[in-house]
Amino acid sequence: MDYRENFDVKKLTSFKIGGEIARVYFPTDVDEFLEAIEKEPNAFIAGNLSNILVSSDGYDGAVILTKKMDRITFDGKKVLAGAGVRGTKLSKLALENNLSGLEFMVAFPGSVGGEVFMNAGAHGQMIADVLSCARIYSPEKGIFTLNNSEMEFSYRTSICQRMPYYVLEAEFELEEKSSSEIQEKMDENLSFRLNKQPSLTLPNCGSTFRNPQGDSAGRLLEQAGMKGFVSGGVYVWENHANFIINDNDGTSLDVLNLMYEMYKRVKEKFGIELKPEVRYLGGNNKKEVEICKILYQK
């Protein structure tokens, strides 16, 4: 199994921010994952770090990255994908097989494990609409399978966020459609992303905060005057106030200071406490830890 010590993670994260991680494992299948978790029972488990802010001061523990668990198997209208499969790749392969339901993934930076974890969605489609079951790992139960209803999906969340459950594989039940119909939907999604979301060439973690029920975090943040706001080497994107861009070798503290300012302004103006969609991995920087206690309320 691929294993690294004192691994500089900066280039791997979508934010292009992060220090050294003491120990990193890259399993390629479930057996290697179990081998890694047996060695490191307290490891932080992630996919390809697309929505994770890694501290610039590094992380002293172990991390298991499932990005190399990327096997894909088609069986009629079903597709089984490993946690590390990129959503973009999976949606394009579904198109090649004339299968619809994953068009919303076409411009997603993340991988299947994280997308199931957070019930990712866009453009009227979401994971909950197409997932039939997921193969899960938990420290107490080991490996087991949950069906769609057992995943307890709701807006941008699943049981995996409330329990120590980690997605290793996911099976999707798709719908047969013509490639032209599927391609049209994908083109619409790509066009929307180009107009409403920053390019993946701009280092960012996607949406910074979840939308509160019945409202838009972007609208609230724009009304709170956050567009273009700068914190060190990062800033709030001028076209949508719920995205933070790493513009000039920004640090994790720059990002957290900016997230706190966003959170504070919306709370003061609207009485709404935004919940972060970006996850944090760190602990060596006291100021970051204090900000995270407020943002993540723990």
Image: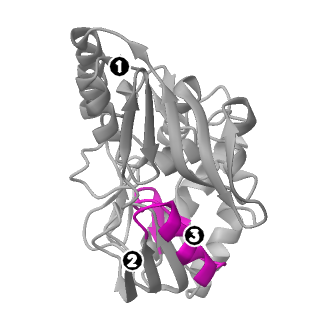
Residue 50 part of the magenta-drawn span: yes
Give me the C-alpha separation between circle 1 and circle 3. 32 Å
Q: Going by the image, does 44 lie left or right of 25?
A: right
Observer able to see residue 232 = yes
| Label 2 crowd bin: few (<14), some (14–19), many (20+), radius 10 Å | few
| On screen, residue 224 above or below 282 | above
| On screen, residue 242 above or below 18 | above
Residue 208, percent from left and from top: 49, 51
Residue 109, percent from left and from top: 34, 48
Give me the C-alpha separation between circle 1 and circle 2. 34 Å
The picture quadrant where one finds residue 189 is: top left
Total numbered circles = 3
Q: What is the three-letter code of the residue carrying label 1?
A: Leu
Secondary structure under the numbered disc 1 in the rendered image: strand
Q: Which residue is mark 1?
A: 99
Magenta segment boundaries in residue numbering: 27-54
Pointer 1 or 2: first along the chain: 2
Pointer 1 or 3: first along the chain: 3
The picture quadrant where one finds residue 45 is: bottom right
- Quadrant for the N terminus, please: bottom left
Q: Which residue is mark 3?
A: 34
Residue 283, percent from left and from top: 59, 82
Pointer 3 or 2: first along the chain: 2
Q: Which residue is mark 2?
A: 1
- The mark closer to the camera, 1 or 2, is 2
Give me the C-alpha separation between circle 3 and circle 2. 11 Å
Q: What is the three-letter code of the residue carrying label 3?
A: Leu
